Image: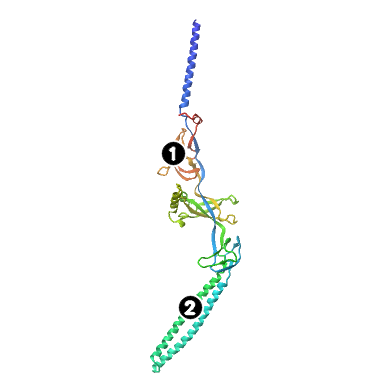
Amino acid sequence: MKRLANYLWSKRAIVVALVCVALLSYYLAQNRLFSPPQPTYATARVIRADIENVVIATGTLLPSREVDVGTRATGQLTSLRVKLGDHVRAGDLLAEIDPKLAESALKEAQARLVDLEAQRAAATARLEKSLLDARREHGLIRGAATSAKEVQAADAQRKADEAGIVSLEAQIVQAKSKIDTEKTNLSYTKIFAPIDGDVVAILTKEGQTVVASQVVPIILKLAQLDVITVKSKVSEADIDGVEVGQTASFQMMSDSKGRRIGKIKEVGLVPQNYAETGAGAGSGAGKSANAQGGGDAATPIFFSATFDVPNPDHKLRAGKTVEVSIVVGAAKNALAIPTAALGEQLPDGRVAVEALGSNGKPERRLIRVGVSSHALTEVIEGLKEGEEMVIGEKASPSSSGSGGTR
């Protein structure tokens, strides 16, 4: 009996022990399920790197210089000595207008001068006669051989002849000026190249009649293509960072030269459509569009920024549209952190960030920053190379799988 009692007690002890182990396991399991997991962080190291802040804009390729070649002569275009694409030098003869009208006008002006000079010669002879008559009458009056009336008449005739010569002299000056004008008009019938350049457009064909009355008719267009001007459209949000002297570049897929690089030479002070619509055009246009279409977006406003690039091979064609990159800030071998790590900015200009401390927990730091791009930001003070920056929390597998846990 005693052996049986001992056996039963040992069996109960085993059962109690198993129950205790089960309860302890359940308790530990519950604590693991409901206690919050320790967070893990996504980090990035403070490194040294080259940083560029780039503004992207749309650019249009234009000739560095373009001239409309016209004429002040009226008549038929009898000769066109160039064709599209020809390269010409300043002073080359480009075209000729029928000179008959100009030659006729010049001959008429020359004939008018000859007539006036003949009239002046006759008037000079008359003046000599009236001077002699007046001198004789003054001699006769002293001997009482004539009357005072005759003397007065002779003096009046002398003065009239002198005035006639003065009038003819003025008309001769006018006639000579008219001849110079007609010679100039005749010179307009020959059209010469005002600059070195390429013929990029021909607007008047050989045989057409041009009339130069109030508007100067355009015969053709010359453009200098050895240098291309890129006129960029920069948004109002980016224009404040764009300055003269900054590096700008673009690249076309078909261009084997790679990126074409230049320096900003002009930055617009007013929007590109300012001259057409006046001050406040952007906001006014936006309100009008909203009123008609019911939308909330205002009309975008763009400012111009231009730069030149060499084009010796003439591979760049005027009129093309390109994507322009303007470097508005750069830092070489600078301390850098991911831009995503930046927090709020304080009134004194410092920026809050979180660095990973030695205990593995985030520590708030206040830093000063410099050049910033979409990816990296320059650190001027507040951090050291090699420190770990917190850029976010990693999602733990257990929390993503538990869904309904609190």
User: Colour mode?
Assistant: rainbow
Q: Amino acid at mark 1?
A: Arg
In the rendered view, does 310 fall on the left or right side of 276?
A: right
Q: Helix, strand or loop at disc 1?
A: strand
Number of disc labels:
2
How busy is the neighbourhood of tag 2: few (under 14 within 10 Å), some, or many (20 plus)?
some
Q: Residue furthest front?
A: 292
Q: Position of residue 8 (x, y in %)?
A: 49, 9
| Quadrant of res 312 | bottom right
For disc 1, the marked residue is 365
| Quadrant of res 91 | bottom right
Identify the residue at image location x=48%, y=21%.
26
Q: Earlier in the sequence, mark 2 or mark 1?
A: 2
Q: Helix, strand or loop at disc 2?
A: helix
Picture layout, residue 142 above or below residue 167: below
Residue situated in front as seen by the camera: 366 or 6: 6
Q: Position of residue 287 (x, y in %)?
A: 43, 50
Picture layout, residue 382 above or below residue 20: below
Residue situated in front as seen by the camera: 180 or 261: 180
Q: Position of residue 180 (x, y in %)?
A: 52, 74
How busy is the neighbourhood of tag 1: few (under 14 within 10 Å), some, or many (20 plus)?
some
Q: CA distance from mark 2 to mark 1?
A: 92 Å
Q: Residue furthest top?
A: 1
Q: Position of residue 209 (x, y in %)?
A: 57, 67
Residue situated in front as seen by the camera: 25 or 376: 25
For disc 2, the marked residue is 171
**Looking at the rendered structure, which numbered label has been put on residue 218?**
none
